Image (cartoon, rainbow, N blue to C red):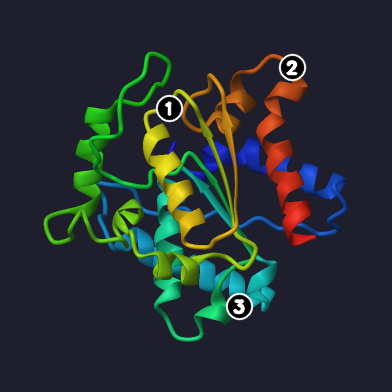
Amino acid sequence: MGSSYFYLEFLLAWISLLKDAGYRNPALFALEYTLVPDAIYPTQLQQTLTGYDHVLSIVGDASRICVGGDSAGATLILSLLLHIANSPNCDQRRPGLATLISPWATLVSPRNRNTPSDYLNAESLQLYGSQYAGSKAALNDPLVSPGTCKDTGWWLRASPSRGFFIMYGSEEVFGPETRSLIQLLKDSGCHVDFQEEQGSIHAWPVATLFLSDSKAERKKGLVNITATICELMG
C-alpha cells in the first residue's frame, strides 16, 4: 500500500467532503516516496521535506497547510516535524495541523504486539523497521524513529500551530506505542485530539473505506478528519 495511487479513492472522497464542508478550492498533495529496499533512510525524509517545501512555496502561509499520513507515512510526517523544529525560521515553516492515522511511531519496539484482529505482524515490522534504518542510521535517532524522542521541548517546537489529530484502532499492533505518543505530546504542551476506535485495526479509516457496507461507515474516518480540520483550522 506504499503507492499514493492506492489511496486515490480515499483522497477523492476527502476532497469531496472538504468541498461539502465549505472549502472552495481544497488541494491535496500526495507524495510518491521511494520504498524500502529501493532506498533507505534518509532518502524518504529528504523526499518528504522536498515535497513539503514545494507545497509551502505555493501556499506561502504554512499555517494553511495540514500535513498527514498513515502508518509509515505518519512516521515520515513526525520525522518531518522534528526536522523542521531544528531548522532556521521553524515558526514560519511549521504547518497548521497534522492528521495522523495509526502512526508507526517507534520502528522497533517490544510494545508493538500482535493481536487477534490486526493484519500487521510485530516480527515482520521489526525487520522492516531495521531495513529502513539501514546499517548507518541508529534506531534510537528521533529522525529515524520519532517515538524514541522523549525531549518535550523538541516536540513542543515541532508541533503544528494548531496541534495534532491522531486516529488509531484499539486492536492494532501499534496501539500501546500510539497511546504513549499521545501522552508524550500532551506532556510536551502540544494540543492533541485523538480518536481510538474500539475494536478496530490498523489504519481503520482507510480500511473501512474499502471494506464497509454502508456509505456512512465507509466515510466515517474521513468525516471525522474533515470535521477536525474545520474546527481547528477554520
* Separation of residues labelled 3 and 1 (CA atoms): 37 Å
Q: Residue 51: x, y in percent? A: 50, 66
- What residue is rendered at 79% in x and 42% in y? 17
Query: Tag 3, which secondary structure?
Result: helix
Query: Tag 2, which secondary structure?
Result: loop
Farthest-out residue, bottom: 88
Q: Which residue is mark 1?
A: 172
* Separation of residues labelled 1 and 2 (CA atoms): 23 Å
Query: Tag 1, which secondary structure?
Result: loop
Q: Is residue 58 placed above or below 45 in the rendered structure? A: below
- What residue is rendered at 74% in x and 17% in y? 214
Q: Amino acid at mark 1?
A: Glu
Q: Are marks 1 and 2 in contact (CB under 8 Å)?
A: no
Q: Is residue 135 placed above or below 100 in the rendered structure? A: below
Q: Tell me which label, 1 or 2, sits earlier in the chain.
A: 1
* Separation of residues labelled 2 and 3 (CA atoms): 40 Å
Left-right relation of 118 to 56: left
* Rendered image quadrant of residue 61: bottom right
The circle on residue 57 is 3
- What residue is rendered at 61% in x and 40% in y? 8
Q: Amino acid at mark 2?
A: Ser
Question: Mark 1, residues whose alpha carbon is within 10 Å: few (<14), some, or many (≥20)?
Answer: many
* Rendered image quadrant of residue 149: bottom left
Q: Residue 135: x, y in percent? A: 11, 56
Q: Amino acid at mark 3?
A: Ser
Q: Which residue is mark 2?
A: 214
Q: Give whichever of 63, 196 is nearer the camera.
A: 196
Q: Tell me which label, 3 or 1, sits earlier in the chain.
A: 3
